[in-house]
Image: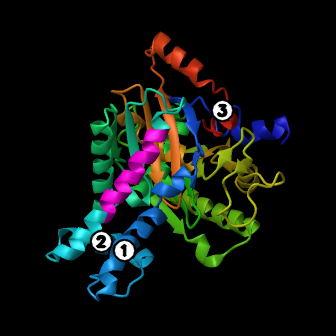
Amino acid sequence: MATDELVKTTTGIAHHGAERLPSVDVDSFNIEMKDEDGFLGDRASRGAFRKILERWRKPLRKTGEDPFGKEPSENVSKKTLDAMLAGDDTEASAVVHSAIEDFAQELAYVTRRFLKSKAWGKTERIVVGGGFRDSRLGELAIARTEIILKAEEFKIDMTPIRHHPDEAGLLGALHLAPSWIFEAHDSILAVDIGGTNIRCGLVETSWKKAKDLSKAKVVNSDLWRHADDEPTREGAVKRLTKMLKALIAEAEKEGYKLAPFIGIACPGVINADGSIEKGAQNLPGNWESSKFNLPASLIEGIPQIGEHDTAILMHNDGVVQGLSEVPFMQDVDRWGVLTIGTGLGNARFTNRRKDGGNGKDKDKDSTENGKDNGKKKSKGD
């Protein structure tokens, strides 16, 4: 993409997939580690848990005592699994607990590999997000993983992401925006793109109540399950534009001072010009084409918000979901996020202190990582 188009898309405030954001440096994201069995992320995904559950059901199924009956393991809801954990059927509860234990061992194995990589060196805390976290079984798996790692003398805290995963991907978009935006505006538009859904939201900053954005909230959102409709790429952009325009109208109706800014969370490796290098294979159509640029396409449909030119910043979805935790990570210097869903999203951050607080140690760590741009960061160890 030509330079003038890049400036038009971001209006000079930053670049897409940036490694330097207002509150944090993004040390790495979307690392794809492998072992002899393939990609590590496949060992700690939503599908991996379902396979483990199926393995524990098999011996019971042979004797006709499977507490789940004939329901396929991939169709058993998290709500049902949570109910069985707390229910009176001890055998059913034991099956779920066994699956949780095995999954925690896999998650610990994967996390261990991340912690031993250069990009994740000196990580003090890991936040776990994604749809799997939104359940009691997910919380137990995360807690068990932390215990396993601490028993191996890894000094690491693991905690479920604070906000609901659906909202975290929208709230994190606030931390893509430059702070001057919050001086004159009280809300932004955010987009969270996934392999099944596209979610748009009107996010209230509550900046006057809390300058660290810890009081921010999603006040309106719209969800489209694009996987059900199987649209073309152009059809998806058109629908997304329509959703955003509806939120702009709603914001005006409700009296919000909407910023001319849209923050986007999107799967894959995001290049500085807004193109997607790889990792967008589950989105409708070919989003990795050199001829396609989502931010530029949205600018064409929404050239202005209010009286100002629209600015758009896009980053990896794991990064953006992790950014929702920025206000609550100020007691550590280096922290990461793992998002458990269709795959395993990942990002590692170093907090940027207003007073330059991390000093020489942070500079040394950055040098050790040897990562100087988002493209290089994404290629892992």
Q: Identify the residue position indicated by label 2 in the image.
A: 81
Considering only order in the chain, which callout, 3 or 2, is on the residue closer to the N terminus?
A: 3
Residue range corresponding to the magenta coloring = 99-113
Lateral position of residue 311 relative to residue 73, left or right: right
Please report the residue visible at 63 percent of the width from the left and 40 percent of the height from the top. 378
**Residue 153 seen:** yes
**Which dot marks residue 14?**
3
**Residue 381, image x, y percentages:** 60, 35
Q: Secondary structure at mark 3?
A: loop
Q: Quadrant of residue 66?
A: bottom left
Answer few, some or many: residues within 10 Å of disc 3's Cα (few below 14, many 20 plus, some between 14 and 19): many
Q: Secondary structure at mark 1?
A: loop
Q: Is label 2 in contact with label 1 (beta carbons under 8 Å)?
A: yes
C-alpha gap between disc 2 and disc 1: 6 Å
Colour scheme used in the picture? Answer: rainbow
Q: Secondary structure at mark 2?
A: helix
Query: Which amino acid type corresponds to the residue marked 1 in the rendered image?
Result: Ser
**Residue 188 seen:** no
Q: Identify the residue position indicated by label 1 in the image.
A: 77
**In the rendered view, would you say 154 is above or below 230?**
above
Seen from the viewer's position, the closer of residues 219 and 250 is 219
